[in-house]
Amino acid sequence: MPELPEVEVVRTGLAATAVGRTVTSVERRAPALRWPIPDDLHARLAGRTLEAVERRGKYLLLAFDTGWLIVHLGMSGTLAWARADLPLRAHDHLDLVFGDGVLRLNDPRRFGAVLWHDAADGSPQGHPLLASLGIEPFSEGFDGALLHAGTRGRRVAIKQLLLSGTLVVGVGNIYASESLFRAGIRPSTPARTLTRPRCDRLADAIRTTLSAAIAAGGSTLRDFVSSEGASGYFQLECNVYDRAGQPCRVCGEPVRMRRDQQRATYWCVGCQR
Ligand SMILES: [Zn+2]
């Protein structure tokens, strides 16, 4: 599943290739993904210039002067820039055509979303899907003090709280395991017991881990394709994730793994308390 680093890589790519170009047509080939794709996108966007590509959590916000196209890649989606004459593949559900280039959305499992938020309705941050998201990990307000305040009274394990996205967005399963390793915190630790210094270390670890993944070009989807069509991601060198039984890179203890529902948690008993 594309996680925050992958979406950020897509955003950066689109900002470099598509921003400043004018939409010439919109072709919708599927009526719906997770929700219906608006059927009036051609009328809304033809002749409009893409002004910016922003990100909130895992949502991409394509900004036009009349509003925002909100795109989520779901479980399997890709949004790739290509030549407009590139032959269609299965699951190419939406094209935003910009003259000789096209922004093409492919989503085999159709858990993604394409929604329109009109400028008349105010900032897209007020959209129901975005309004309740946790803070951005790279925003100024995200630090140990915020994590400390947000974990008071919470009995839930810190890893579960991170995965929920209500405290901070973008810390999916891989990044939660890796961040907690870097911070020396065992994933099962009740959130409310974390001291302020540990919260400081965790905030730093989350930023460091996500930055490394973004630098590596995203890391979680085996067939993930960036907006420029480059593939073969998976370059983040994990310390614990997917390394059950292998020696910890720091202390040599075998990495432990526990599975809850469908999710696997990895940690080192030597390095994480
Ligand atoms: Zn260790």
Image: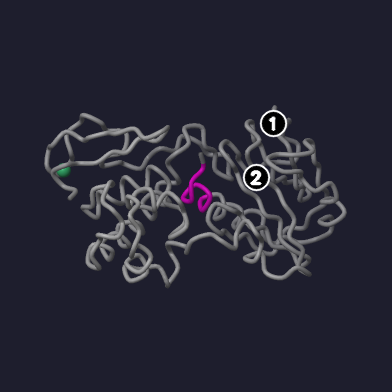
Q: Main secondary structure of the magenta part?
A: helix
Front residue of 218/15: it is 218
Locate residue 143 relative to residue 110 in the image: left or right: left
Residue plotted at (62% across, 32% down):
109
Is 20 rendered above or below residue 86? below
Sequence-earlier tag: 2 or 1:
2
Q: Position of residue 231 (x, y in %)?
A: 50, 36
The span shown in magenta is 2-9
Locate residue 120 relative to residue 157 in the image: left or right: right
Please name the residue that numbered disc 1 is placed on.
91
Front residue of 262/192: it is 192
Locate residue 177 relative to residue 230 in the image: left or right: left
Please name the residue that numbered disc 2 is placed on.
81
Locate residue 97 relative to residue 196 in the image: left or right: right
Q: Which of pointers 2 and 1 indicates the residue nearer the eye?
A: 1
Q: Position of residue 92 (x, y in %)?
A: 71, 34
